[in-house]
Amino acid sequence: MTKDKNGASRRQFLTSAAALGAGAVAAGAARAAAPDPLITEVQPWASGFGDPVDAHPYGTPIRFEDDVIRRNVEWLTADTISSINFTPIHALDGTITPQGCAFERHHSGAIELAKPDFRLMINGLVDRPLVFTYEDLERFPRENHVYFLECAANTGMEWAGAQLNGAQFTHGMIHNMEYTGVPLRTLLQEAGLDAAGDLADKWIYVEGADASSNGRSIPMDKALDDVLVAFKANGEALRKEHGYPVRLVVPGWEGNMWVKWLRRIEVMDRPVESREETSKYTDVMADGSARKWTWVMDAKSVVTSPSPQSPITHGPGPLVITGMAWSGHGRITRVDVSTDGGKTWQPARLAKDGENKALTRFYLDTDWDGSEMLLQSRAIDETGYVQPTKAQLREVRGLNSVYHNNCIQTWHVTPDGKAENVEVS
Ligand SMILES: Nc1nc2c(c(=O)[nH]1)N[C@H]1C(S)=C(S)[C@@H](COP(=O)(O)O)O[C@H]1N2
Ligand SMILES: [Mo]
């Protein structure tokens, strides 16, 4: 590059910074006034070649992003086999979760099951018990849908008080992917449901091929509605940890029902009442009674930035507040943001119209005056349901619950831009 050209590009930068208005980019304009070697000097990446196309046959994120990873909380579980890690939602944007950092939850570890070893049996109250190979599944008409999966235990550590300091840890048991698969309805019809008689009181019991089997009962009307037998996520094969080669997708319902490494579906005249649907994933209410069958994940949202792991790194002025919202009952229609702990609310901008049982990204493009904030978001879905405060949820649920905590989250943002998990009363 010649000196002339460097000079020209520097002038261009000064013009565009000025065009944006002095107030809006005060910090940027100040930087432009001093000679900036990134603008005035030829950099190493412009004076040699980059990687050839065959350097990375399957790409991974550039090394500068190597902190955008799943993390676990060591004390939460006794070991890392029956355990959980969390999606780095504080560092993601948009709505699709890359499989490589989408949280994992296993009861007996992630198994390696090859396509030739895959079998899916449908048995029980069907006309023709069937066993499908992976290739069989590929011959049925398939569909594509984007859905969120939220573990019922997401935000479960926050019942008694603000505990985990980061959106990744308080809200990261969620991912949102585009699934490709065959409607379960198609496979059940292939096996024939006449033998089941009146379908209104029928159930399916679904099992995985892993040692835990993670067996769950699902009522027949859901099974025939929008459940998918999926083999692709975000365009590519499911990752091992998400159930390769085939998992169940149960839109809007708690993650535990999304059986991975799917191996058997039994049509039954009653639920099984397995471990996963009795002693686990059941809600202990304020009066000590246990509520089972909390399948649908109610509307919920969280501000992902600023948040404890994503502090504000600049002074007063333009600030983009962003987060995500979702509802197991359908579409998100509105998200409100509060900067004063829920005293006043302003509607956020939805990046796109809410999609059925999928994550919605919201933004509040604001002008931060540099004072402290009690930052909250609240989601409203197409049924008119409004995400509750922690106090409202506790009135119904008490303090003994773990699962299904969809309360409003608060981040205390201080003038230095740092954020902390707090509770407001
Ligand atoms: N076979 C099997 N399926 C399973 C599990 C499991 O341990 N084994 N864990 C369940 C739970 S509790 C959740 S929250 C989701 C997590 O899916 P993910 O690991 O793709 O995030 O899978 C569910 N399906
Ligand atoms: Mo879960």
Image: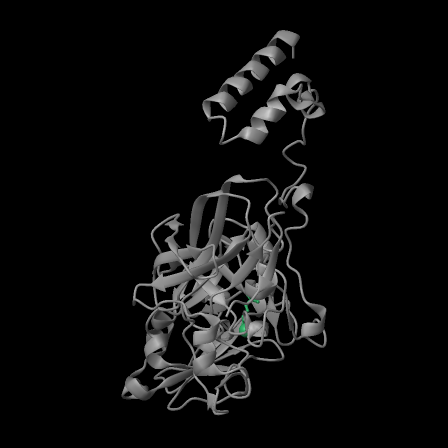
Q: Is residue 323 above or below residue 240?
A: above
- 217 and 37: which is toward the camera: 37
How many discs appear?
A: 0
Q: Is residue 400 above or below residue 143?
A: below
Figure quadrant of residue 412: bottom right
Tell me where residue 371 appears, x and y as whole percent: 55, 48
Residue 137 is left or right of residue 29, and the answer is left
Judged from the image, the quadrant occupied by ligand 2 is: bottom right
- 345 and 321: which is toward the camera: 345
Examine the rendering and report whether any part of residue 17 can be seen: yes
Tell me where residue 179 appears, x and y as whole percent: 44, 59
Work out which residue is located at the far top of the displayed protein and give it. 4
- 135 and 169: which is toward the camera: 169
Quadrant location of the N terminus in the rendered image: top right
Examine the rendering and report whether any part of residue 265 can be seen: no
Tell me where residue 140 appears, x and y as whole percent: 38, 63
What residue sits 46% from the left and 26% below the top?
20
Figure quadrant of residue 329: bottom left
What residue sits 51% from the left and 64% below the top?
409
